[in-house]
Amino acid sequence: MNLQQVHHVDDAITSRHSVRAFLNKAVEPQIIKDILTVASRAPSGTNTQPWKVYVVTGKKRDEMVERVCKAQIELANRPELTSQYQETFAYYPETWISPFIERRRENGWGLYGLLNIQKGDKEKMARQQLRNFQLFDAPVALYFTVNKVMGIGAKMDIAMMIQNVMIAAKARGLDTCPQAAWNHFHRIVLDVLNAPEDEELVCAIALGYADPNDIINTFITPRLAVEEFTVFLNE
Ligand SMILES: Cc1cc2nc3c(=O)[nH]c(=O)nc-3n(C[C@H](O)[C@H](O)[C@H](O)COP(=O)(O)O)c2cc1C
């Protein structure tokens, strides 16, 4: 790979960020197919390729958004329903510890600050949370499922596939938002997808063309310096 190619790869990786406002502009099905073809070069334990991807657009997308938004609104109004909307696997810890809790807070308040959402403004927070289930207006939703028989390693494999999808999309001028938020509504999602009983929802991705004029898309998150998360051992 020459230096220019290295820069192209680095640019695709470093320019990716979570986009939370999309244009009402369709994505060519062939582009989605190309992205998935490239992304499927992701490694997987013993090449099991445990991912299954549902590409949801058009009326099916609208049905998904409508059903899950309805459930989310009901849940926001009736917190006692929380137990009905448990994820199948815990993405986040039950008890948060430092330094992760601080980073999580910084992320949340950074985003809310940009949107002028103050602490305690539950209505605005609920509206923003609902944006997840409107796919931030993206025309395409990708839902990744795995066979329930597969272990935790398969989720690692699928995570690699997901990253590939996001980078391959970026290289084609498309943007994404990975969304674990949908996992709370896995029953509805799997029902709309008509997925077989043995499948479990792992993650969703909103895919489309970013709205360059929406302030939310100017949100760029920080990263630690290499020295802060790496231990170099030599002898
Ligand atoms: C597996 C996964 C699930 C995520 N779920 C959501 C989500 O449901 N809603 C959302 O707005 N962002 C979600 N994010 C985006 C993260 O907040 C984001 O990746 C993080 O703040 C770093 O910012 P960046 O993606 O812009 O670099 C998710 C990210 C990952 C990796």
Image: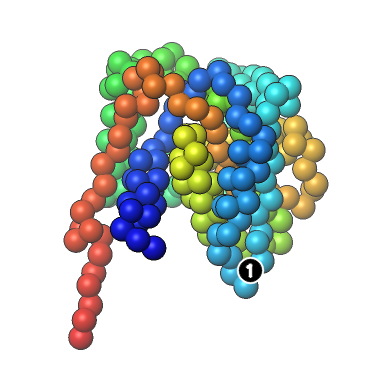
Residue 112, picture quadrant: top left
| Viewer-proximal residue among 97 and 143 | 143
Q: Quadrant of the image for the N terminus?
A: bottom left
Crowding near the residue tagged with mark 1, few <14, some 14–19, many ≥20 C-alpha atoms within 10 Å:
few
**Relative vertical location of residue 219 with respect to residue 40 in this rendering, above or below:** above
Residue 141 x, y percent position in the rendering: 61, 33
Q: Residue at x 32, y 29 (%)?
A: 219
Q: Is residue 69 visible?
A: yes
Measuring from the top left, give residue 67's x and y in whole percent.
69, 23
Residue position for label 1: 47
Residue 120 can be seen, yes or no: no
Q: Is residue 11 left or right of residue 208?
A: left
**Count of numbered marks:** 1
Query: Position of 116 compared to 91: left or right?
Result: left
Percent position (x, y) of residue 107?
31, 35
Q: Which residue lies at the image location 35% right of the left edge and 46% below the top edge?
A: 11
Where is residue 183 drawn, in percent x and y? 59, 40
Q: Is residue 209 left or right of residue 113?
A: right
The colour scheme of the drawn protein is: rainbow
Q: Quadrant of residue 231?
A: bottom left
- Screen quadrant of the C terminus: bottom left
Q: Amino acid at mark 1?
A: Asn
Q: What residue occupies the far bottom of the structure in this picture? A: 235
* Residue at 65% in and 54% down: 51
Residues 189 and 224: in front is 224
- When asked about the image quadrant of residue 189, the answer is top right
Name the residue: 43% across, 49% down: 93
Disc 1 on helix, strand or loop? helix
